[in-house]
Image (cartoon, rainbow, N blue to C red):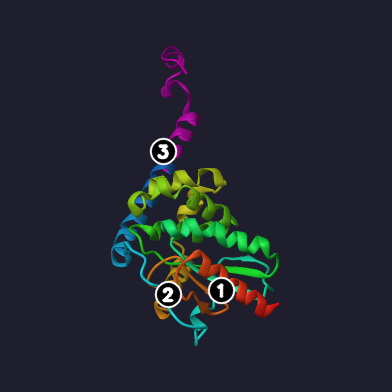
Amino acid sequence: MSRKSRRNRASPERQGPQVNKARQASRTRRRGILIGIVVAVLLDVVVGTLLYRNDRSPPLQGTAVGNHAPLASAHSPMLGDAGAKVHIVEFIDPACETCAQFFPLVKQLMAENPDRIRLSIRHVAFHGGSDFAVKLLEASRRQDKYLPTLEALLASQAQWAPHHTVQPDLVLQAIAGVGLNVEQLLVDMNAPEVAQRMQQDRNDAMALKVTATPEYFVNGRPLPSFGQQQLQTLVSEALQSAY
């Protein structure tokens, strides 16, 4: 719109009380969103400072985990057929660059073995401010948009997490095309069940000595060492054993 046409528009005072009320309501909603972001960022800074790690530590060594209780993930997002006999449990940090690189590999393995592999995703925040992205992912489940939200975040990770540090305003931009109700999302991010699920994932990660992401367990077995080939081999062995 040109400057001239802007000048020709009626001023707020001339547009009547209904228009003024609508403008005031819009300003109030915007303030509410900004306040929600600020509160979430302050909480994320505290938690992120405690959990932050730069490097990927060596994954767990050995055979199947003796106590499978920490791997139980009935509360976690699951992809694939619930009856699949090969169960991959992945601990993921949405701000983790390696997680973004490995997720397509896991999806490929599932596509190559339809109805035979299921994936449970556990969230752990090891990078600065990652709790904001984790809470957003958990809240997106209320709108049944978890997977498209996760994929949008991983695909644009370099933009919203420069130097592995989350920028909340850029996170919201990254998911703009998913179709989420952002106002409701910001409310749901602070729901008690979101905090409970996040705490459960943290507790289970500690019990399993998960110190970096991504970390995988295939039918209870951790990777013998970290790498794409190691993951493919572990999944292949599980498929052969189960089918």
User: Which quadrant of the rendered structure holds the C terminus?
Assistant: bottom right
Q: How many marks?
A: 3
Give above or below for 48 relative to 14: below
* 30 displayed left or right of 149: left
Q: Mark 1 vs mark 3: which is more N-terminal?
A: 3
- Residue 33 appearing in the image: no
Give above or below for 177 relative to 217: above
Location of mark 2 (residue): 205
Q: Residues within 10 Å of mark 2 (few under 14, many from 20)?
A: many
Label of residue 27 in the image: 3
Q: Residues within 10 Å of mark 1 (few under 14, many from 20)?
A: many
Mark 1 and mark 3: Cα distance apart in space: 54 Å
Q: Quadrant of residue 52?
A: bottom left
Q: Mark 1 vs mark 2: which is more N-terminal?
A: 2
Toward the viewer: 81 or 186? Answer: 81
- Residue 30's x, y, as percent? 42, 42
Mark 1 or mark 2, whichever is nearer to me: 1
